[in-house]
Image (cartoon, helix red, strand yellow):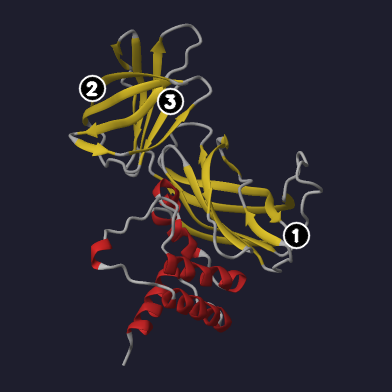
Amino acid sequence: MSTTDDRLETSLFDLFAVQPHAAALGRLDERIDRRLRSWTPRSAGAARVARLRPGRRAGVIGLLAAAFVIAGANGSLKGLYFFLAGPFDTPWHRGVEVNQSQLVDGYRVTIDRAYADATSLALAISVVDELERPGTTQIEAFSTIVTDEAGEYSSGWGAVSSPDGAFAAVNVAWKTPAVLPLPSGTRTIHVELPFIRVRDDSIPPPNADEVGWDPWHRVAGPWTFDFEIDVDGGTTITPDIVTEVDGLAVRVTRVIAASSVVRVEMQVEGGQPGDQWWPYGKIEIRHRGEVLSVVTQSLKDDGSAVLMTDGGVSDASGAWTITINEVERGDTRLVGPWVLRFDAP
């Protein structure tokens, strides 16, 4: 007869796709036992709804994550992607499996999964120090150079996990193609990591006022990968519509709408020469009445703003409404709203 513990263990192994060492499980059992013994229930009057803050992990789940980090080089780090939230989990949950791995000087770098749409490429990358070098407290793999037949991708943003183990981490890197939008079809992607970074706290700085001391150092590779991925190129719309409030005009120049993402490019025009305004606060994008949540905003070198949603549309035709409630420049904010409406064929 299976117990609750057996079912929990089986479910976690299925979720995280890893079988930790017996020693790791033993240490995990000890840590969970200490945590449970130290737990004191709240009184009825003090009971309240628990709320997890972004980036914070529940205690016991954090301990479970530790077991998968301990599994490290001989197990799978895939469970750590579970702790990346928001847009950072996109390559894991929406991407396709790549599972290419390369070992250089005892450091194993693996591209676990990849995600591509008309506007971006995202990579889920894990890194493990299989030699578990003394003094190491953290490692990361962010030096990604991505190219395809159209050229080199520009760097975007990313995230790195903060697991309980020093010798393993997962990383998410977003890249923007050389030419937008990416056309639909299969693309061959080349990825190179010329180096990884390792944090070593075994040697302290010479003195407390030391300038320029950095516990991180580079470990040279390279780690190289080639794989193919299918792209949904979506639909490109160039409405070039503008609306003005109090002398400031917001212009939407391009919308790229695919099944998994919508990218909106816009400019805020007006004010004094040299002023650089950009959207601030809540931004609402509606397509045929349905709201698409904006999850990232960025500012390009030419001063235009780029908005990205956490979901897309299967058919871009129909009515679109984009509402900008505020714009800002430094510490100055102006309240609109600026409402832009257009129809796509």
Residue 118 relative to residue 189: left or right: left
Residue type pointed to by label 1: Ser
Mark 3 and mark 2: span between their CA atoms?
18 Å
Location of mark 1 (residue): 202
Residue 93 x/y as whole percent: 39, 56
Task: Tell me if I can see residue 173 in this picture.
Answer: no
Q: Secondary structure at mark 1?
A: loop
Mark 2 and mark 1: span between their CA atoms?
59 Å
Numbered circle sitting on residue 341: 2
Marks 3/2 in contact by CB < 8 Å: the verdict is: no
Location of mark 3 (residue): 305
| Disc 3 packing (10 Å; few <14; some 14–19; many ≥20) | some
Residue for point 43% across, 49% down = 230
Q: Secondary structure at mark 3?
A: strand
Find the residue positioned furthest to the right.
Answer: 206
Residue type pointed to by label 2: Arg
Residue for point 67% across, 68% down = 130
Residue 97 relative to residue 310: left or right: right
Q: Quadrant of residue 277?
A: top left
Viewer-closest of 68 and 51: 51
| Disc 1 packing (10 Å; few <14; some 14–19; many ≥20) | few
Residue for point 72% across, 50% down = 215
